[in-house]
Amino acid sequence: MTVIEKDTVARVHYTGTLPESGEVFDSSEGRDPLAFLVGHKQMIPGFEEELMGAKTGERRTFILEPERAYGPKIPEAIQQIPVSMFGDITPEIGMTLMSDVGPFRIASVDGELITADFNHKLAGETLQFSVEVIEVREATKEEVAHGHAHGPGGVEH
Ligand SMILES: [Zn+2]
C-alpha cells in the first residue's frame, strides 16, 4: 500500500484551526479534497512532516509552531507608507491590498501615515490541523517535473 512520502500525491480533507481561539482559518469542508505533490514545497513544511507514512483512510491531528508553519512575524515586513501613495483607495484597518511585492494588510491608519503589514496573515501563529487522507498514489513523472499534483484538487492543465 502506498503511504505518504516524497514523490507521492496525497488527496486530503483538512481543517485548520487556531488552537487558542478555536477559529477555523481554512478548511476543505464542502469542497473537493486538496491534492498535493509531497516533498516539493507545495505545502508548509510541518504539514507534510506530520503526514509522512500516513495511508488512505488515516486521520491525523497535529499542532504546528510558527517555525514549521508560516514562520515568525518579521518586524521589517511592517512598513509605514504615506496615504498619498494609495491614490483613489481609502485605506482602512484590516483591508488587504496588492502591491508590486505581494499582498499586505492595513495594520493601522494614523492620519497621513498608513502601517502596512506584509507578513503572511498566519505568520507568528501556532496552527492546529485535522487531516483525513482520502487517497495516496505514486506521482507521475510529469507531476514530479512540474512540481505539483495534477487532476481533481490539484492543477488542471
Ligand atoms: Zn503541471
Image (cartoon, rainbow, N blue to C red):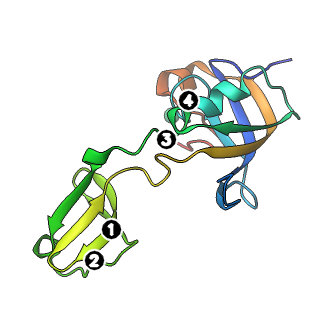
Quarter-wise, where is residue 95 in the image? bottom left
Question: Can you identify the residue that label 1 sits on?
Answer: 106
Q: Secondary structure at mark 2?
A: loop
Q: Secondary structure at mark 1?
A: strand
Whichever of labels 1 and 2 marks the residue nearer the N terminus, that label is: 2
3D distance between C-alphas at marks 3 and 4 = 9 Å
3D distance between C-alphas at marks 2 and 3 = 25 Å
Q: Is residue 33 left or right of residue 90?
A: right
Residue at x 69% of width, y 18% of height = 5
What crowding class fits label 3: few (fewer than 14 Cα within 10 Å), some (14-19), or many (20 or more)?
Answer: many
- Marker disc for residue 91: 2
What crowding class fits label 2: few (fewer than 14 Cα within 10 Å), some (14-19), or many (20 or more)?
Answer: many
Q: Position of residue 2 (x, y in %)?
A: 80, 19
Whichever of labels 4 and 2 marks the residue nearer the N terminus, that label is: 4
Q: Nearer the viewer, residue 112 or 99?
A: 112
On screen, residue 90 above or below 151: below
Question: Can you identify the residue that label 3 sits on?
Answer: 70
Question: Can you identify the residue that label 4 sits on?
Answer: 45
Q: Would residue 153 be seen by someone viewing this image from the given angle?
A: no
Residue at x 25% of width, y 65% of height = 115
On screen, residue 61 above or below 77: above
